[in-house]
Image (tube, grey):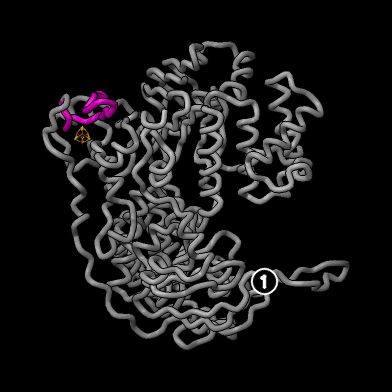
Amino acid sequence: MLEIKALTTELDSDSGLIRAVDALTLSIHQGETFALVGESGCGKSMTALSILRLLPDSGRVSSGSVDLDGTDIMQVAEARMRDFRGRRISIIFQEPSTSLNPVMTVGRQITEVIERHTSVRGEAALAKAVDWLQRVGIPEPERRVNDYPFQMSGGQKQRVMIAIALAAEPDVVIADEPTTALDVTIQAQILDLLKELQRTQKMAMLLITHDIAIVSQMAHRVALMYAGQVVEVAEAAEFFARPLHPYAVNLFDALPDESKRGRQLASIAGSVPALNQEFSGCRFADRCADAMDQCRRSPPELGEFSSGHTVRCFLYDGATVTHRPTHTREVDQLIAADSPAGATVLDVCDYKVWFPIRKGLFQRTVGHVKAVDGVSFSIAAGRTLALVGESGSGKTTVGKALLQLLRGKAEISGSALLSGQSLDVLSGANLRAARQTVQIVFQDPFASLNPRMRVHEILEEGVASLHPEVAPVTRRERVASLLEKVGLTRSALERYPHEFSGGQRQRLAIARALAVEPRLIVADEPTSALDVSVQAQILNLLKQLQQELGVAYLFITHNFGVVEYLAHDIAVMKNGKLVETGTAQAILHNPQHEYTRTLLSAVPRLVKATSFSAEF
Ligand code: SF4
């Protein structure tokens, strides 16, 4: 249905010409789900935009062809291309909030596609739009068809996006991270819906994702991309049973899960190389434990290892395996056993955070949003409590309220004792001093580090305010050794946050939190913006610091792989209340509450994938 040959996409940038996609070749059959996986910056989304000819102004497809059922769509005029987009090939974007038109009803956005690409008009088109809303699972579609996007939840907006993408019944749909912005339960519904629609419509789907578990549930075939190139293609079942490329092997090793508790996760050293250079050898060579002389001298070609399984690596010379790729060395390195729980660091009892709803001229309080409504839990030194639940359940509000970041904005009651002391009643210098015991690491390290301050200023700020008696030279020495502790060099002290990668910035945020020697760190989704290999480095670091320093973590997350790997205890939150708390072992293996069971069953897991040839 879709045959891509030697597709090359170039982008102009301040640092020169970037070859974002380099000679990409793959084909997708009717009714097949083909997954394109890889870490950020490897060219997945650029491939999608190239196929649809929706590249930014600075980009162009410099060579190659994209054959859609017999027509090379790279060669057709733009006016004709508009007939192809939506009708023959369409795309579901990652973020429905920014992809839907906020000033048009969802019904109008669906009928626009139907009227543009088919002969159906007016009332009949509206009836079709209602039908599509029904098919994608929007309740009361006759009424909701007149709603605007802001009147819908995140999951419903993504369903509308899917309805728009499929309304003209395209032959091929590209789903670019279609569930990344959604909660696990909504994600499970959307994935089931896509599977069902694909089966009934017999369309081909190019699924772009960084989530390997989703690939294992959805895909018939998989292509792994690295630095703009495809490095491995295989049937999904084969890929998961026998990954060949060292990058693929390392990625699997880096995924956190329960079986890896007590061990360090594999992390892939270094980062994806810049694509504004000419490569003389293998692009993965600097990060590969198996790199040979030959790998740096000449670039490997994509070669067939077995029927339908191709790989770009010199380890596989024809079908002869010279040797198996090395699993990253750290993988077998055992972590010291968890020390027994120490004294209680945080004791939260019947904690409530209510936001007042004000109305009228005098802004009188007419009600409350009960974001957190009577939660109780405790964390001991050296332990990790994972606070899990869907977005809007109140997890982040708990963290922020504990750090006194919601003072004056919300009504807070109940008690939260940090090492026996209540922060709620403190103010001024006393509060500043008490804040030393608890720090927070946010999800987005870039937004939480001041871009105008050098690293040493960022790290010294907290020490200076809490320990003004410490001499500047001692302070500098202390933050320098902290940097080394989080795996950065002293040379970083004089640099600005923008000079670091995402993973390095998160290390800086952790170093900043540690600078004041806290007893508790609230970590709010600290790895959700990071790639798998970088996530592994940060999780290793957090675990190691806990063992060395005995710091306790309140880990707010929706990633169950991370929970399984890191948490000692789990608290499940729904609508501001805790529905279940217990040890990680008990909650993961014997959940008692219906909601916990629903949440756990919605988590995508690595499964043996379906065989395309068996189904079709
Ligand atoms: Fe590693 Fe060499 Fe294979 Fe590249 S070609 S992945 S450097 S072994």
Is there any visible trace of residue 409 in the rendered image?
no
Q: Is residue 361 left or right of residue 280?
A: right
**Measured along the vertical axis of the image, is residue 60 above or below residue 401?**
above
**Residue at the spot x=37%, y=62% of the render?**
564
| Residue extent of the magenta highlight | 301-317
Q: Amino acid at mark 1?
A: Lys
**Residue at the spot x=33%, y=52% of the render?**
255
Across and down, in percent, residue 232 comes to: 30, 32
**In the image shown, does 609 or 309 lie closer to the viewer?**
609
* Rendering quadrant holding ligand 1: top left
Across and down, in percent, residue 92 comes to: 57, 35
Label 1 CB sits under 8 Å from any ligand 1 atom: no
**Measured along the vertical axis of the image, is residue 568 above or below residue 613?**
below
Figure label count: 1
Q: Quadrant of the C terminus?
A: top left
The residue indicated by pointer 1 is 370
**Residue at the spot x=70%, y=37% of the render?**
101
Q: Residues within 10 Å of mark 1 (few under 14, many from 20)?
A: some
Residue 303 magenta: yes
